[in-house]
Amino acid sequence: MLGHSIGAALVGTFLGVLLCYGFVGPIANVLELKAKEEEVYFHVIRVALVAFVGGAAPQMAVESGRRAIPSSERPSFTELEESIRK
């Protein structure tokens, strides 16, 4: 009877470790990355709105927002101007 209890405890422990490191941990990492992406998105909007409310011209406020975009995803100045003119 004691061996059965020890075996059940070991199975429960190993199952908990597998679930934690194999499933819950990776899901938490994906959710964290998505939250950080949304944080960057809202930061860019906040920078543009603060510039506009602070008295900057709309084009300058958009340029302030463009500069807040991470450099790996930032459009060039000409791409931004073409998008604004459309």
Image (cartoon, grey):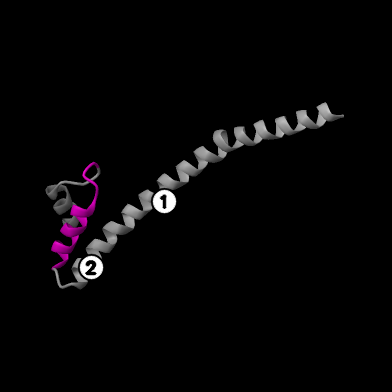
Q: Residue at x 77, y 32 (%)?
A: 8
Quick one: 78 or 44, which is closer to the camera? 44
Q: Circle 2 sits on which residue?
A: 50
Quick one: 17 or 32, which is closer to the camera? 17
Disc 1 residue type (three-letter): Ala
* Residue 32 image point, x, y percent: 44, 47
Please tell me whether the stretch drawn in magenta is mainly helix, strand or loop.
helix
From this view, report whether residue 22 is shown above or below residue 64.
above
Disc 2 residue type (three-letter): Val
Q: Circle 1 sits on which residue?
A: 35
Q: Residue at x 18, y 53 (%)?
A: 67
Q: Which residues are magenta?
A: 57-72
Tell me which corner region of the image, top left, top right, bottom left or bottom right, holds residue 50: bottom left
Give the spatial CA distance, label 1 vs label 2. Answer: 22 Å
Of labels 1 and 2, earlier in sequence is 1
Task: Evaluate if marks 1 and 2 touch, with contact meaning CB atoms under 8 Å apart.
Answer: no
Q: Residue at x 74, y 33 (%)?
A: 9
Residue 42 lies left or right of residue 19; in this view the side is left
Q: Residues within 10 Å of mark 2 (few under 14, many from 20)?
A: some
